[in-house]
Amino acid sequence: MRIKTGDTVAIIAGRDQFTTDKKGNKVRTTGRVLRVYPKTNRVLVEGVNIVIKHQAPSQANEKGGIIEKEAPIHVSNVALIDPKTKTPTRVGIKEVDGKKVRYAKKSGEVLDK
């Protein structure tokens, strides 16, 4: 998996693919990766795939009720944002100074510092 925690990604498939901006234009949804689940090939993206959960009362949450939280989405539905062009790009791996680093395929910019 070539996406890591803290990366900014664009949603390229699913119901959260597009949002509307202040002018009413359709724009691609972006968000920061909060957590990566490599065994299931899923990522948790901030503000994307919001689901409603009915929470039963417990000691931590005495009232319970309905809460909204992010659910993981498959890694194939996201694409990394190129830091140079600010567009979705694929990620490649190359060797620089004897170390393997990730790079954006559109601009060739190294992602790992």
Image: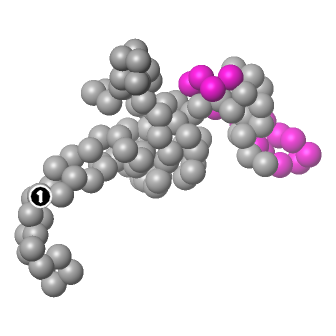
Q: Residue at x 69, y 32 (%)?
A: 83
Q: Identify residue type, mark 1.
A: Ile
Q: Residue at x 31, y 50 (%)?
A: 70
Spot occupied by residue 88 in the image (x, y as percentages of width and height):
56, 25
Identify the main secondary structure in magenta: strand
Say few, some or many: other residues with alpha carbon within 10 Å of mark 1 (under 14 / 14 to 19 / 20 or more): few
Q: Residue at x 47, y 40 (%)?
A: 31
Question: Dot 1 corresponds to which residue?
Answer: 66
Dot 1: element: strand
Q: Is residue 4 left or right of residue 95?
A: left
The stretch in magenta equals 85-101
Spot occupied by residue 60 in the image (x, y as percentages of width and height):
21, 80
Q: Residue furthest top?
A: 25
In the picture, residue 106 is in which quadrant? Answer: top right
Residue 100 highlighted magenta (yes or no) = yes
Q: Residue at x 9, y 74 (%)?
A: 63
Give the camera-side residue of 8 and 38: 8
Give the vertical position of 4 relative to 9 (above or below): below
Spot occupied by residue 32 in the image (x, y as percentages of width and height):
50, 45
Q: How many marks?
A: 1
Give the vertical position of 113 relative to 111 (above or below): below
